[in-house]
Image (cartoon, rainbow, N blue to C red):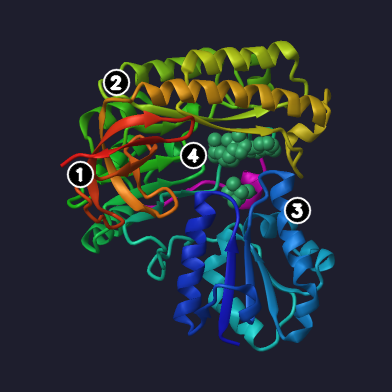
Amino acid sequence: MKTFYIETFGCQMNVHDSEKVIGTLLERGYSQTAEPADAELILYNTCSIRDKAEQKVFSRLQQFKKESGKGKVFGVLGCVAQQEGERIFDRAPHVSLVCGSASYNKLPELLVQIESGGRRVTGLSLDTEDTFETALTRRDNPHRAYITIIEGCDKSCAYCVVPFTRGPERSRTAESIFKEARELAQMGYTEIQLLGQNVNSYRDPSPDGMDFATLLRRVGEIDGLKRVRFTTSHPRDFVKEIIDAIDGNPVLCNHVHLPVQSGSDRVLSAMQRLYTHADYMRRIEWMKRSPRRIALSTDIIVGFPGETEQDFQQTMALVHEVGYDSMFSFKYSPRPNTAALGLEGTLDENEKGRRLAILQETQRSIQIRRNAELIGSREEVMVEGYNPGTAQWIGRTSQNRTLNFTDAAGRQFGPGQYLDVLVTRSGPNSLAGEAVN
Ligand code: SAH
Ligand code: SF4
Ligand code: F3S
């Protein structure tokens, strides 16, 4: 059994975890296949953030049920694995391996068990000490690299499964982060994304206890890096020093993702978000006052239990006030183990859908306006590829906008290359322009 297939769901942390899992498997002599049908070991790295995400893996497992008799071995990794544990074997009896993200350093041992015919093999411990072994990571993109700086989450937002699926916060030492970032820069990576569920609560576990703003500043000074991003920021722990760092170094991208979830203090308090509308707006003001034009994005949940029409209108008012450059918005989805399950005032799906549609329509018009403001400006892009359908090159700006462009001189560009583009047109989700000579 030496071939595997892996499909990844969920956030960037999961995408990066899969890169570590792939590295571990390659090291053990496995080869990766592009299709599940060609693999002997089929892995799903799963997400449990909303019910729909969780259902996806069970429908995938169902699809391949018939083939499981033909010697295929199935494994469920990630957040659904941690959440459901051994119950997965009951729901999908053809699964042999269930392993949460905190136990990936045990994968070599677990694979030995699987290879010798083991059934119901699990890695579900959340108190794993050294989850930061990065030597085997096989990065998918040769120019942009993820680095996890903090695992888990110590907040207890009432709607959220993450503290249960990824366990308590564990920060990695600043020294090992710098070492990995320097090695990546030497290998030719020019963009680094620092990852964590709440990067702002990063605290170096070694004695000097470096905080996130300092870490960010220092990563931005590493030779060879052109872009440094970070996600996700929790407003409660988001300090002004982060903006000062961005102001002081163009390598730190002028984009901040700061999930607000709701504009209503009543709902924020029920969500246990630990900040008010006013606290949040203070942080937005820091960014608006920055001499660099910092792009802002957010996450919003509509239809949290007890959310009234008035609460929803407060969210709409906040969205207008901030004028986000982009937004991820969701209908509240009840999740196992979470505090919100005990709350009254459940909204029906139609009402949640109505609010979501209004919010998304409004955000679309805000994005049309925000993107149009950039027409006539010159933006540096990192080339991501070429779209033969539109005959345009695909680029990404520091603000994390997609900027598709053509080149009058007919030059060829390669992924990972940087150049300046003049913005000439805009739409709700992207910009278009012409390469500058
Ligand atoms: N750690 C990040 C977010 C992690 S989850 C943070 O604190 O912001 C990404 C987004 O999914 C959240 O910001 C939230 O908007 C959404 N989300 C989380 N749980 C949800 C639920 N039960 N129902 C709907 N959306 C949810
Ligand atoms: Fe979930 Fe809140 Fe932690 Fe984000 S900060 S991962 S929303 S509990
Ligand atoms: Fe999903 Fe787990 Fe990420 S629940 S959003 S994959 S932390």
Callout 4 touching callout 3 (CB < 8 Å): no
Numbered disc 2: secondary structure: loop
In the picture of the structure, the residue carrying the numbered disc 3 is 55
User: Residue visible at 71% across and 10% down?
Assistant: 310
124 or 216, which lies in front? 216
User: Residue visible at 67% across and 57% down?
Assistant: 82
In the picture of the structure, the residue carrying the numbered disc 1 is 221
CA distance separating discs 1 and 2: 20 Å
The answer to if 103 sits in the magenta stretch is no
- Where 174 falls versus 266 (above or below)? below
CA distance separating discs 4 and 1: 22 Å
Q: Describe residue 307's horizontal placement relative to residue 241 as left or right.
A: right
CA distance separating discs 4 and 3: 26 Å
Depth check, mark 1 against mark 2: the one in front is: 2
Q: Position of residue 419 (x, y in %)?
A: 22, 44
Going by the numbered disc 4, the residue's amino acid type is Asn
Depth check, mark 4 against mark 2: the one in front is: 2
In the picture of the structure, the residue carrying the numbered disc 4 is 198
